[in-house]
Image (spheres, rainbow, N blue to C red):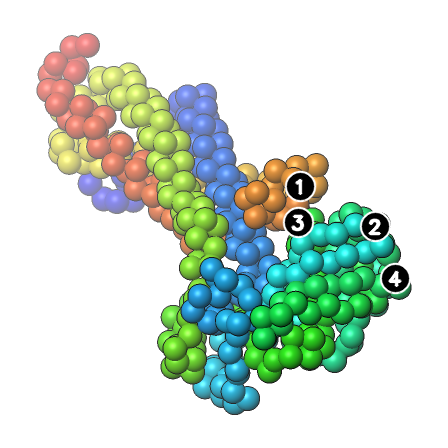
Amino acid sequence: MPVKLLLQLSWRNLWRHRRRNTILLVAIAIAVGGVLLLNSMLRGMQVNMQETVIDNLTGHVKVLQPGYLDDPSIAHGFEVARDWDAELDPDAIVGWTSRIRVPAVIMSERETRGVQLIGVDPARESISFLDDIVIDGEALGSPEDRRVLVGAALAEQLETKVGRRLVLITQGADGRNREAGYRIAGVYRAEVAALEKAFVFTGAETLKNMLDTLVVTEVSVRLADDRFEPGILATMVDAFTGLDVLSWRDLEPQAAMIAEFMDTAVFIYFLVIMSALVFGLVNTLVTAVMERVRELGMLRALGMRPRSVVAQVVVESSLVMAVGVAGGVLIAAGAFALVADGIDLTAFDESLQSFGVRPQFTPVMQTGDVVLVVVLSLVLGLLASFYPARRAVKQKPLDALRR
């Protein structure tokens, strides 16, 4: 049978049963649209979690002295060569910075808290959450800035504010306690409130002078894209011989495990929904074939080959699936446009912090995911149509005409 005639017969048969096919089309469109929309939510959570980890002073790749993670003190510091980044591909990285991070005790006139004291070069911190914070007061001006930047939540606990003095106590390079007074330059507000309680920032050179050292405790690199990670890791391993060069997945294994689980969750959810949909599609097609036994028997009696009957049923189901999938993509695109700017989850901020998710949640629709859902839906629909098609050709022409 000519393909053109086969398509014409299949298209006309679809319009003969408008109600049934419309219900089937709506079911397919809602299922595909729901899968794509939930997929964008899961991808958004995955990207959100990864970006949060990377922003929180981790970066994509970090260099540490062996043993620093077990004992985060200045004793596990190292020196950084001035030209070490010469081999880095400038198109692969957003930027890099070195920091000094040590545990410290901070004291105000009324309260005392344990914090992480971090010496930074403010000009290089565009690769971390410090680039997005809102500051009441002033930001740090340079690595030599002798003031501190504290979080709003910590300032509230210490019952202090901009302009007041604080005392910081930490351990110096010689193992003895060092104590120094600092004035508060500004109070910062971060998207994740836990950061405000944990980190206190000052100039890197100021902290070096306080600790009486020339070393840093970490070098952090942010990449333009994840695909550059293997190459940058290899380059940094050669540049920092004897040091630990770790990816964000090594430093935050729990977040990495959850992010990887999202890939599996997307696939499992798709299979569950589409399996139920295919089951309904098969039942509908079997019913349609049984209603057309006399018609198909007559076509066989007029000379239509069995394979042409199979092809007609398969083409009909494929057309239904294709139109339904297209409708589902449009539904998902429309729903995604409503939430593309982000969803405010501030009310669940404390719960989200335990998963490393920001309160401003932005769904992510990836082209690869859309293509995967569309292709797998069409393939499953095609495979589902073969069973009722085989049922159709098993009917003998004479038996079909007697019914």
Q: Residue at x 48, y 50 (%)?
A: 255
Within-10-Å neighbours for mark 1: few <14, some 14–19, many 20+: some
- Earlier-in-chain disc, 3 versus 1: 3
* Distance from Cα at disc 1 to Cα at disc 4: 29 Å
The answer to whether residue 397 of the structure is visible from this angle is no
Q: Nearer the viewer, residue 184 or 72?
A: 72
Instruction: Give residue 184's quadrant in the image.
Output: bottom right
Residue to which mark 3 is pinned: 194
- Label at residue 349: 1
Quadrant of the rendering where the N terminus is positioned:
top left
Q: Residue furthest front?
A: 176
Q: Residue furthest right?
A: 163
As helix, strand or loop, the secondary structure at mark 2 comes to loop
Residue to which mark 2 is pinned: 110
- Does residue 108 lie above or below 14 as drawn? below
As helix, strand or loop, the secondary structure at mark 4 comes to loop
Please name which of the two marks, 2 or 1, marks the residue nearer to the observer: 2
